[in-house]
Structures are given as C-alpha cells and as structure tokens.
Image: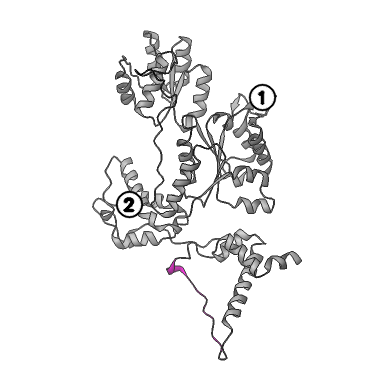
Amino acid sequence: MLIALRKIIEELGCDVTPVSDGKQALDALQRCTYNLVVTDLRMPLVDGMQVVRASVSRTIPVIVLTGHGTVESAVEAMRLGATDFLSKPFEVPQVERVVRAALSGGQPERPRSGRPISGRPERPPEQPLIGSSTAMESVRRQIDRIADADGTVLITGESGVGKEVVAHLIHSRSRRRDRPFIPVNCAAIPEQLLESELFGHTRGAFTGATQHRTGRFELADGGTLFLDEIGEMPPAMQAKVLRVLQDKEVMPVGASRSVRVNVRIVAATNKDLREMAERGAFRDDLYYRLNVFRIHLPPLRDRPEDIKDLLVHFLTRSYAKRGEAAPPLSEVMTEEALERVMAHPFPGNVRELESLVERIVHLRSEGQVLGPADLPLEPPRRTQRSGRTEGSDVPWARAPLVPQLPEEGIDLRNQMESFQRSLISQALQRADGNRTVAAEYLRIKRTTLVMMIRRHGLDQERRRH
C-alpha cells in the first residue's frame, strides 16, 4: 500500500517521503517541512493519531486512511483537525481527488473546461452478488431501483444468504456512497451496551464511562447504518430507534442535548417481523417504518443453479489469498462430486458453501481431482425444534407416508382433505399457534399455510377456543 500510494502521489508532481511506521513519520516531521501528510491509523510503535496531532500542530493538512475497523478513529481524527480521509480499499482517482483538494486548501479541483468536478469520490470496489438465477436477477433489479431512494430498507432471508452484501450494494450505489457504511449486529451486542453503541455516551454517564464515545448513528451521519439481526433488538431499544427514525435526532447516554443525524437505515433479519409484531414480540410501528422497501433473499437450496457460480467465485478468492491462480473447476472436482455439492441442502446457505470451499482448498493436494467421497460435506442434521432433517425436501432425504388402501375403497378427496386438515391442526398445536413455525413443520410457505387454514376453517376454530 505504501509503494502504491507513493507512486500515485508522485505522478501528481509531488516529492514523497515514504515511512513504514508512526515513529519514522514523527522523525521526518522533525527534520523537514511538508505540505501534506497521508497516514494510516493502525501502525507499529506510534499510532496514526499521534501523527495527526503532530501534523495539525504544525498546520500541515492530514489525510487519514481508514478501514471498517477504524471508522470511529477516523471520525476522532477529523475532530482533531485532519483534513479528509480515504476508505480502504481505495482507487487511484479517489486518491488523486483527495490529495489535490488537500494541497489546494480544500477547494475542489477544476478541469480545464472550467466546470467543477463532482465532490464525490469514485465508487469503492463492490463485493459482487454472485448468481445468475431468476431470483438473483430480481434482487439486482430491486437494488438498482431503490439504491438512490432515501427510504429505509428491510432485507429478509435465512442466516448466511448474503444480506450484508446486499446492504453494501445498496449503499455503494446510492448518493451516500462517499459517506460511511456502519454495520451493527444487534444480536452480538449485550442489551445493556446496545444503547451506548448506537447513540454514544458522555464521559461519566455511567460507571466505566471514562471518555466520550460517539455512537454508531452519529458515525454514520450522511451515510448508511446497517442494523443486522434487528429481530433480536430488545423492545425498549426498538422504541428509541423508532424515535430516531421519526425525529432524526439521537440522545447520547448522559447528554442533555440531542444530536441531529442524517442516516439511511438498512435493516436485516432472518425472522418474520410481521408475525412477531402480530404476537407483540416486535413493535408494529417500527416494523412499518423499516418496511418501506423490502428485499427477500431466497435460500441457496431454492436456487441450486447459483451454486456453480459461487463455487468458482470462492475458489478464485481462496487461491488469490494464497497468491495463486485458481485451477478450473473441472481440475478441482469430478462431475459426480459437483452433482453431490449441487444436491446438498446447504442449511448454512452461502456462508456454508464458502466454508466448504476454504476446506477444499486447504485439504486438496496439488493436482488432485476430488470425487464425491473426498468432499468435506457435513451430513444434514435434524433441527431441535421440528425434529426433521434440514434440507429434507431433496429426493434422497424424503420419507413419505404410504397409507394402506382398504378393500372397500375410500373417498380420496375427502380423505386427503381430512388428512391435510389434521396435519395443519397438529402443526399449529405443536407451534403454539405460531404460523411461521407451523409452516416450517409442514415445509410450506407461511402465505400458503394461512390460505389453507382459512379454507379448512381452522382460524375460526382457534378463535372459539
């Protein structure tokens, strides 16, 4: 990165002094006077924040480099007086624009035609949405339609289908692409810490709050806040997030004044929020606020035609990490092995397939072509809730019921209706009336189950009881 940045900036006509850590940077600042400093934040010996302070004290413009893990530090660097920041990974035009603006005192460069250059940087590289199935083409069209709108987006789908990839694409194709994309996993943060994470806190707001902390809403100002697993958000926090969506203001813990924020919310969940709202487990007013635009990502088992594309993509990426070119898929596994992979139910979805490819690359010896028996595939497991095998809708996992036909014959239509009604009633009873769970027991869509419940009059029966 150091070599690349040196080359880019030298081609702008600048003399560049490259240094590989913060201590060397401070030494260089002592020896010479510079017109601009470009610094990373995480460095050995002396961190980038000290380099920022030293540069600002000498009235030298500073550009900081930031990744997702250092966004908060980049915001703090801007408060200290840094001129601008570059998000990693960056592209050459983006570096050129920011450096030229810093060297010209923050004024945007003007081309020879006299027309002002756009203030937005080049788009950062996007993580692609892999798959050529009809379902994925539909998702791409939805992303293109809603990216530039400012309404909230709700992304639904099972765990591991790629909801965060879709959220990134929505952000990177929107007008907010040059502002931060801040992800928050609502399920991974303890309830007692979530308010501080989202809204921030002041120094002394509670025991252990030794310094001011900027919340994720404020960090995402002007950009996108991605609330992953929002179905796990506690009810009290749901009310506070709803207030932010309504008022466009956040109140840090311990603060006396609110802070205005301009943030687009993209939320994701693997739960049925509407069903949760119906039974009081999720605020219905927040659900409707979030569900302005909706994108559903189908599970991998419903789009097996995408598996081959994903295999090639993950193989290419895995070998690239090792500094090698990926061999053709035909040199990695036989046709029989490929068929076995495509028949696998993948309960972990795309994430499970990615993990499988990592294991294949690690275990495969050079020149080896894997057969079906060589694949490190995990067998389908039985779910704790339903007792059925995950992915048991594939042919080799079915266990159909075969009733005996009596000698006198039967009224087939009535028997099938009675059989269907009995199974639906049992599923509803086992799921305590939860229609989403009951649909999982029966391996049908929730909308199909609702229609069948009405046809059999089971909704009226449950109301009587």
The residue type indicated by label 2 comes to Leu
User: Could you tell whether 192 is left or right of 50 in the image?
Assistant: right
Quadrant location, the C terminus: bottom right
- Location of residue 263 in the rendering, given as x and y in whole percent from the top left corner: 57, 33
Q: As drawn, which residue projects farthest toward the bottom?
A: 407
Residue pointed to by mark 2: 363
Asked whether 366 falls inside the magenta stretch, the response is: no
User: Could you tell whether 377 is left or right of 145 in the image?
Assistant: left
Disc with the residue nearer the chain's start (2 vs 1) = 1
The residue sitting at 40% across, 38% down in the picture is: 126
Q: Number of labelled discs?
A: 2
How crowded pointer 2 is (Cα within 10 Å; few <14, some 14-19, many 20+) is rated as few
Q: Can residue 465 be seen in this view?
A: no
Task: Please tell me whether residue 359 is drawn above or below residue 180 in the rendered image.
Answer: below
Choose between 390 and 285: the one closer to the eye: 285
Quadrant location, the N terminus: top left
Task: Please tell me whether residue 330 is drawn above or below residue 460 in the rendered image.
Answer: above
Residue pointed to by mark 1: 204
The residue sitting at 45% across, 46% down in the picture is: 141
| Label 2, label 1: how far apart the Cα atoms are | 52 Å
The residue type indicated by label 1 comes to Gly
How crowded pointer 1 is (Cα within 10 Å; few <14, some 14-19, many 20+) is rated as few
Task: Please give the label number shown on residue 247.
Answer: none
Choose between 92 and 351: the one closer to the eye: 92
Q: How is the image coloured?
A: one colour
Q: Can residue 127 be seen in this view?
A: yes
**Span highlighted in magenta in the image:** 394-406
- Location of residue 50 in the rendering, given as x and y in whole percent from the top left corner: 47, 18
Choose between 145 and 436: the one closer to the eye: 145
